[in-house]
Image (tube, rainbow, N blue to C red):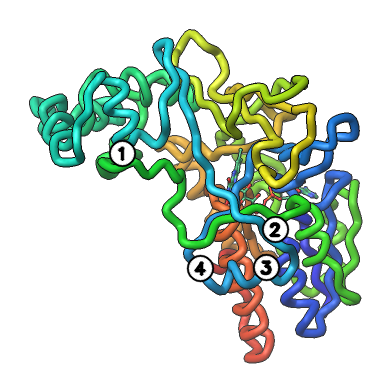
Amino acid sequence: MEILLVGAGLSGAVIGRRLAEAGHRCRIIDARDHVGGNCFTERDADTGVMVHVYGPHIFHTDDAEVWEYVNGFSDFMPFQNRVKSTTQGAVYSLPVNLLTINQFFGKTMRPDEARAFIAAQADTSIADPQNFEEQALRLVGPALYEAFFKGYTEKQWGCSPTELPASILKRLPLRFNYDDNYFFHRFQGMPTDGYTPMIAAILDHPNITVELGTAYAPDMAGAADHVFWSGPLDGFFGYDLGRLGYRTLDFERFTHDGDYQGCAVMNYGDRDVPWTRITEHKHFSPWESPPGSVCYREYSRACGPDDIPYYPIRLVEEKALLGDYVARAEKTRGVTFVGRLGTYRYLDMDVTIREALDTADLFLDRAAGGGDMPAFAR
Ligand SMILES: Cc1cc2nc3c(=O)[nH]c(=O)nc-3n(C[C@H](O)[C@H](O)[C@H](O)COP(=O)(O)OP(=O)(O)OC[C@H]3O[C@@H](n4cnc5c(N)ncnc54)[C@H](O)[C@@H]3O)c2cc1C
């Protein structure tokens, strides 16, 4: 079959590869002038630093098949994300762990002592938390909430934590040991030469053609037996019911001679510091040692029509509009909506790959059995 895939990010590349290997011809288009979608990395010409152009990306997964899959297309170097936070005039370790708690309160507590101490800080007068702020106060108490959660959340989401659902903090967001590895997953690493060569290798198959700088036009679908759409769900319908809300990011790039901050990611918890974090890209490749440095100061704000959509908001209003677009999509034949934009969800890379592999397998099954492919495969 002739397959059109819109988007040369991980979703389009992984689905395209699987279908190409099964003998289908895949035309993959992307409006951008590069492959890789938001995982795109490139080496800075002046400093030689590998830059994560659309923000820092750390690969982590518990899915052994996905880990094997990515290792089939790139070498990986070990990498664990160890985030720091500057707040209230001091630097702490994140996620909030025993070191953070002891330093913040000036104590030398062991795990059980810290648990009891935090339990005493928690605001037990809040029996049924109605929002993020109440939930955080009930779980960690006012001091840690103010320092590590309140300001950062306000900057990230552009609203008061009282307007966010309590469900964001499902359980106690603290560790009572000295583990500062940001992710819990068994497999973690960084592709040795960045994500772009890895995704280019996935796309490197005789049955795949890639057209960059090519935005989707409706007449392209006519030539295809099926379309996989990894662009924005509302964008497929020309945004005619309104736009699904996103947060966008502004990256203020600056260079530094030497080591700017000594770590890859430094969060800023104080409300009066306008940026949420600074990333220093060379620390994502600790096996390289370029003398210069490239950093991004990161700001979060509401996404306008000409901005890059990063984080779906998914509050009550957005979910209602999402329902309307999903209903439209389900009535559209011959198109499957995939990936973070096509399904309007935040998806880590490993989940994106898992869903892409499963989507491609479902397509191959349906094609073999004569059944229709649904609008959403998950
Ligand atoms: C700031 C940030 C940090 C992240 N960090 C991590 C991390 O540390 N670890 C992790 O596992 N995941 C991380 N992620 C998630 C990761 O970026 C996604 O899993 C991944 O990008 C999803 O791939 P995708 O192909 O679905 O979407 P995308 O990468 O967005 O690709 C979609 C592509 O479609 C193209 N497109 C859209 N509309 C059209 C159109 N009309 N015509 C033609 N082309 C079109 C776009 O140009 C884009 O290239 C992060 C995400 C963000 C926002």
Tell me residue 166's x, y (percent). 29, 36
Task: Report the Cα–Cα distance between label 2 and label 1.
Answer: 30 Å
Residue under numbered circle 4: 63
**Quick one: SS at disc 2?**
helix
Tell me residue 86's x, y (percent). 47, 19
Q: Nearer the viewer, residue 275 or 3?
A: 275
Residue most extreme to the bottom: 369
Q: Which of the two discs, 2 and 4, labels the residue nearer the N terminus?
A: 2
Q: Nearer the viewer, residue 171 or 111?
A: 111
Q: Residue at x 21, y 33 (%)?
A: 139
Instruction: Give the number of the mark in front: 2 or 4.
Output: 4
Residue type pointed to by label 3: Asn
Q: Which mark is residue 10?
A: 2
Residue under numbered circle 1: 173
Tell me residue 371's x, y (percent). 62, 84
Residue 266 figure quarter: top right
